[in-house]
Image (spheres, grey):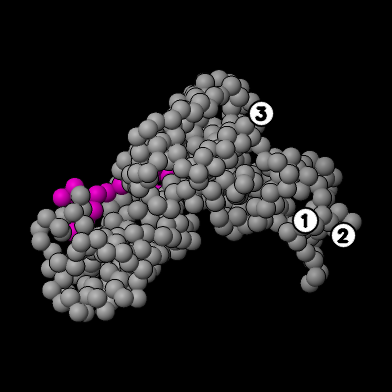
Amino acid sequence: MEFITDITIIIDEADHTDSVTFMKILQSYSREKTGSCYKVRGTYKELVDLSIKLSTMGHCFSPATHGQICHEDGQPPSRVKSVDVSCIVIAYIEQKCANELNKIGSNTFAIETKPDPQTVYNKPSSTVQVTFRPRHVSMYPVHVDFVRQRFITFYQRTASDLQVASVPVSPHDHKELQSRFPQLLFKSSHNKYEVTVTGSFVHIAKLKEFLLQNMQSSSKSPKNKGPADTPSSRTRGPDDESCPICMEPIVTAEKETLQCKHAFCRNCLKKAFAHKPVCPTCGVIYGTLTGTQPDGGKMNVTKSSSSLPGYEKYGTIIIHYYIPSGIQKEEHPNPGQPYEGVSRTAYLPDSSVGRRILKLLRRAFDQRLIFTIGQSTTSGRNNMVTWNDIHHKTSTHGGPTHYGYPDPDYLSRIQDELTVKGIK
């Protein structure tokens, strides 16, 4: 899945000795010239191809230019600044998102994690360092920072939807559940009758629903009921359609088909919709989505005449969020336990698009979708108010890697994230 789809780089013609070949390579790309520099815009893949073409023709960077394009912190071109990440999140990414991780590196960069996340996985607050190293010394240097930015974006999106839960599972059911729920990462705990599960909110909800139904079925079954009579072991016909929630054949009289054409057991869908009115398979929203943002929060908006990088023609919209501390309710991960509140400041350009997004964010806040309660991906602490997969710019500068501007695709991305929540 591509998260950074539109990128702009600046290339100085003076850095290339063969100007004729240089212009032939650039002519097929969208570009804008200012002085001796060309601003080239395109997708990640297009600019990777461009960097490879330029590296094959040869280029000559002055030391100053080389440092500015490749690494602002002055690090050597073979390695960019490392990223500190949660060991729990990166362990999940390495084991369950290996294909996405390989795409980020494009087979030209090694993404290395030290120490091994598995060695510190049982310490929730532990962090590890991710570094980026080109497999070939001759790689065009600007490519390195693209890989780092893509990784950070992917990491943030994965972490924002990730949950860690302990579920009661007997040892002989462990492997069966791993096979049934391949999107989840299962780890043995100190209690041999429990496992720690890491995965997205939707998949963990499906696992808990499955375990609950099995427990209910077992409690209602006669003591002398044999294994051949249990729902999970009955013979299925070739045309039986399985419910994606309970994984059992759907009884025709109890079948419920949504407008998106996905079908479920009526009772399973009712329970799922009571939790969240979206299709459990494709995520299409039915009705108004209400989140688990704690009550009592405030969203205040002010404006400043100063501009944001990339939006020099406009002022700045400043959003102040405040969620007080309190006690968790039934809809939260640990009902009855206290949670720690949060105060956050975010920034938008005061343009027509920025003002439209502000209205959408106000609706999302009123529908309790901006924040939730969970585990902080930065500190590893539980029972914290955290962002709920609608990414905000909490800094005015620093670019995407520091949650700031410039970031030419940000306004488009946040609109997509709001649309997923039914806010459009």
Residue ID at (38%, 49%): 407
The residue lying furthest to the left in this view is 63
Q: Are marks 3 and 1 in contact (CB under 8 Å)?
A: no
Residue 267 seen: yes
Element under label 1? loop
Label located before the other in sequence (2 or 3) = 2
In percent of width and height, residue 408 lies at 40, 52
Residue 148 image position (x, y, % from top left)? 32, 54
Q: Which residue is mark 1?
A: 258
Element type at marker 2? helix
Crowding at dot 2, Cα within 10 Å, few <14 / some 14-19 / many 20+, comes out as: few
Lower sequence index among marks 3 and 1: 1
Task: Choose top left, top right, bottom left or bottom right for residue 36.
Answer: bottom left
For the residues labelled 2 and 1, say whether their Cβ atoms are less than 8 Å apart.
no
Whether residue 272 is situated above or below residue 56 in the rendered picture: above
Q: Which residues are magenta?
A: 73-91
Residue 81 percent coordinates (x, y): 24, 49
Q: Is residue 80 magenta?
A: yes
**Image coordinates for residue 419, horizontal then vertical, percent:** 60, 49
Q: Residues within 10 Å of mark 3 (few under 14, many from 20)?
A: few
Kindly identify the amino acid type of the residue bearing the numbered disc 2.
Thr
Q: Residue at x 35, y 71 (%)?
A: 29
Q: Which residue is mark 2?
A: 252
The CA span between labels 3 and 1 is: 28 Å
Query: Which residue lies under the disc numbered 3?
Result: 330
Residue at the image point whose x is 55% and y is 42% from the top? 356
Q: Amino acid at mark 3?
A: Glu
- Nearest the eye: 13 or 3: 13
